[in-house]
Image (tube, rainbow, N blue to C red):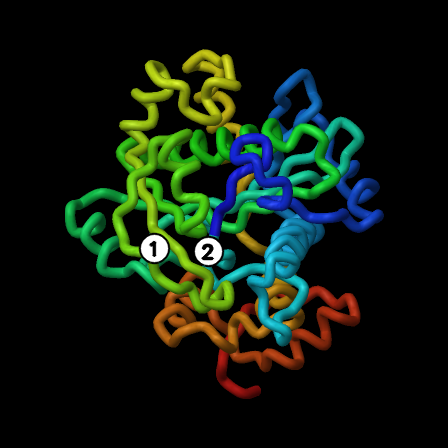
Amino acid sequence: MLEPAEELRNTPEALVIKSAPSPVKENLKLFKPDEGLSFFNGKCMVHVANRLMFRQKAYELVHKLYDEKGFTKKKDSDLWLSIFDALPSTTTLISQNAQGLLEGTLTVVFDSPIGLPADALYKEEIDEIRNSGRQICEFVSLGKSKTVKNSIKVLACLFYCGFLHAWQRNKSRELVITVHSRYENFYRRNIFFNRIGPERQYAKVNGEPTVLLKISLEALSRLRRTQRAFPFYMMNFSDQEEREFAKKIENMVQPMSDEEFYTFFLEKTDTWERALPQQKDFIKRVYPVHQINHQEVSRALAKGFSKKNRFSDDPQ
């Protein structure tokens, strides 16, 4: 679920995490300035999490946020992700400040044969969009550290880059999000989303009340020129600059490596084990299958060996 920033909705604990692990600052310095997009005079840099270390920091950040709000379950790992994060097109954006400290993250999931995360609650409503011939994407896993001094700027950068990335993929695409019902008014008032589904309890976040919202990227593109739509009123860039931003984001996207897949879906979480059969079948088509044992691969990776083979449910 996505929740707005405290500056915009006036609730201090809405979207914040108490602290970030100390190693994050040094690790993110591995990013070179020209690898990301710079906003607000370099005070906010947005990158695509396209390496194991940065994906992990993003997943940890969101998990800590949701854990503090009581959305996680005790048996959960310290990472917040789903089988949709394994899709090559799924894009996790991360923001850092001028000192290299991780400050926020947002993930864009594009529709595929295994659907979208929101299908778990709103498949009928989302299928109506699909049946109309419109393509869909979804924003998920928004997280922001409490140590951020300018949280509204961090969220603006993440949403802006998410919109540009989705727009680059298909300008007629529909964007959907699931949000806690108490934050619905923020998204409708500030970004002009519309509700397309009734309030329902979302099991993944311990039964919290959730609503499904949607906006057309075409409509948003028009509104941002005539209305005070977040985050566009904070971004004064030309159409050409935005096309260049979108292209740069697209070029930074990289599918997970073998090591990343095994680390996040087999070794550190039970995401693969809990995936539906049709989800596994599609992921196997994305990542060619070889006859190897999951546990053997996980142990080998933990020891630092390089494995080029992919995964299978078949025993060795």
Mark 1–mark 2 distance (CA, rounded to whole Å): 9 Å
| Rendering coords of residue 183 (x, y %) | 45, 44
Is 173 rendered above or below residue 60?
A: above
Residue 96 is left or right of residue 242, and the answer is right
Question: Which of these two is toward me, 217 or 197?
Answer: 197
220 left or right of 3? Answer: left
Q: Is residue 35 visible?
A: no
Where residue 236 sits: x, y (%)? 50, 13
Check whether the beta carbons of the residues at disc 1 and disc 2 lie within 8 A of each other. yes
Numbered mark located on residue 39 in the image: none
Residue extending farthest left: 132
Report the residue at 53% width, 31% height from top. Answer: 8
Identity, as a three-letter code, of the amino acid under mark 1: Ser
Residue identified by numbered label 1: 112
Residue position for label 2: 87
Instruction: Please tell me which residue lies in front, 44 or 114.
Output: 44
Q: Badge 1: how crowded within 10 Å, few (<14), some, or many (20+)?
A: some
Residue 310 shows in this picture: yes
Q: Tell me the quarter of the image containing the C terminus.
A: bottom right
**Depicted 154 relative to depicted 197: above or below:** above
Q: Which residue shows up at 54% across the image and 43% down it?
A: 106
